[in-house]
Amino acid sequence: MEEAKQIVIDIQKGNIKPIYFLMGEESYYIDKIAAYIEDNVLAEEEKGFNQMILYGRDVTIEDIVSNAKRYPMMAERQVVIVKEAQDLSRTIEKLVEYAENPQPSTVLVICYKYKKIDKRKKLHKVIAKNGVMYESKKLYENQVADWIRRVLAGKKYHITPKAAQMLVEFLGTNLSKIDNELEKLKLILPKGSEITAEAIEENIGISKDYNNFELRKAIGDGDIKKAFQIITYFSENPKDNPTVVTVSLLFNFFSQLLQYHGLRDQTPRNVASVLKINPYFVKEYQTAARNYPMKKVSAIVATLREMDVKSKGVGASNLSNGDLLKELLVKIMN
């Protein structure tokens, strides 16, 4: 995030490079940087003759180089953006010759999504020397809630830990999907608002009471009645609550709980740091640790491994996903 911000800041200051090679598993920042260049490097009246959008599936490296070598018309520079450049992965090294001596009046942007080029290859070294080589890395699940908080803080919004966790559990780690939902919320809620679980439920459609976050908490608290209510809701709404996702999240929770039991220093600050969780959730782990001793947690982790296989259709006979979850719950909370 900070590296992406710095690229934008440098462009704002007029420090514009002739090549931007944007690559990596997370497409969100690749799209954001490319969009910023597309919207801001040229004045509106200059774009008609001097800004070109190409797509990797439709062009060759030779086509890209030919366009990049053109001179701008009635402008200081031209912008050539190549989207979906990963479609050119087999021939991308052919860009070396141009990258060694790029046209100074061209800003060439290569959007190379979901992949990255070998850092040992010449192309990587040449672009890193003469332009900007940016890798957009996928965030781990435990980093996304903090990313949501920081993005919203930059727009003068706040979000409760529970609301952020609901978004992560419902949308996963896809930052573009999450950003789309945040944009909807910003249209509805006035600047300075706190985004709550209730706001998420009302405007995005994620239940604040029946979700994986609440299931995890109910299990940790030993509240079998509430846990069964949530499981029943999941079985009645399977499309919105995939069993595979529920099992995976519970596996992560109990794996972290196993880590918790092994900590010598169980102060809230250390627990949050080691488990990579928001300090707000430390109490949940403290409560769950009292209800589930280490030996029991080890057995639960083994059960969840077995259930993960069953939820994918292996050795599950004719059990529905709802029945599988109920069977799992009995084994965990018995």
Image (cartoon, rainbow, N blue to C red):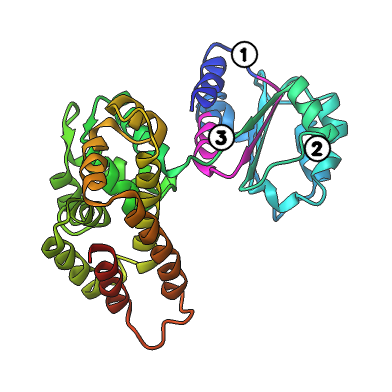
Which quadrant of the structure image shows residue 238?
bottom left
Q: Is residue 178 magenta?
A: no
Earlier residue among tags 1 and 3: 1
Asked if 47 appears above or below 76 in the picture, the reply is below
Earlier residue among tags 1 and 2: 1
- Which three-letter amino acid code belongs to the residue tagged 3? Ala
Picture coordinates of residue 244, whole percent (x, y): 40, 66
Residue at horizontal 81 percent and vertical 26 percent from the top: 126
Badge 3 is on which residue? 34
| Residue 250, visible in the rendered structure | yes
Farthest residue, direction top: 13
Badge 1 is on which residue? 15
Picture coordinates of residue 14, whole percent (x, y): 58, 12
Badge 2 is on which residue? 65
Region in magenta: 17-36
Horizontally, residue 131 falls left or right of residue 251, namely right
Residue at horizontal 26 percent and vertical 67 percent from the top: 329
Q: Mark 1 to mark 2: distance in Å?
A: 22 Å
- Secondary structure of the residue carrying tag 2 is helix
- Secondary structure of the residue carrying tag 3 is helix
Mark 1 vs 3: CB contact within 8 A? no
